[in-house]
Image: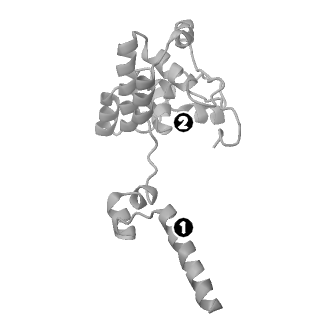
Amino acid sequence: MAQELGLGVTPWSPLAGGVLAGKYTRKDIESDVRQGKNAPQKNAKAGKNQSAQKQQADDEMPSRKGFAQALGNLSSRGLDIADAVKTVAGETGHTASQVAIRWLLDQPGVTSPIIGARTLKQLEDNLGALEVELNREQLDFLNRASAIEHGFPHDFLHSDMVRKFVDGDTVIDRAANAHDNADDRHRHIREAAE
């Protein structure tokens, strides 16, 4: 949509809360489901002099992992995309973070991602994305891995079964129809004139 309107995009959290950096694995999801840990974790650093309201807000603040889950980044789909990023990182000899950021920079309309590095080491690693070069095959692989599912009714209406049911697998040759329609119009005009 932004491209259609000629707008630049400044994406936030290009590493999806650490998911695309390889910070999490499927075990992180599985262990939380088994232990019922989808709730936010308590903040153990709350000071004694904080107001009750601030204390409650701190207690309800999710961990980084909880935040990634709450945003939907730490999910089976998110980890599938992270696996694709790791594959390309292995091919290029760069880190997953660098590949993910480079991939984002290579998207049309992206002006500058807002990175969330917390440490100097993370910042230096993120900036290494500027040295990464991804070929067309790698970009296509990452784009396929992250393709957005349109869902119902789009996927349903575009399925082969529904298309065959609706149009009977008919192909319309517009050029031939235009010629036939013109002949019919001329025939009707001649008949009316007689």
Residue 136, horizontal then vertical, whole percent:
45, 24
Three-letter code, disc 2: Glu
Q: What element carries label 1?
A: helix
Q: Can residue 37 be seen in this view?
A: no
Give the label, 1 or 2, closer to the camera: 1
Estimate how packed mark 2 is, as few (under 14), some (14 to 19) or many (20 or more) residues with alpha carbons within 10 Å. Answer: some
How many numbered marks, from 0 up? 2
Q: Where is residue 128? Give x, y as percent.
A: 53, 9
Residue 178, which numbered label? 1
The quadrant where residue 83 appears: top left
Percent across and percent down for residue 43 are 52, 27
Nearer to me, 52 or 91: 91
Task: Kindly identify the residue that appears in the image at 61 percent across and 24 percent down.
Answer: 113
Observer-nearest of 134 and 29: 134
Disc 1 to disc 2, how far (Cα)? 66 Å
Residue 95's image quarter? Answer: top left
Front residue (pair 183, 88) = 183
- Residue at screen point 31% across, 36% down: 35
The residue where tag 2 is placed is 60
Element type at mark 2: helix
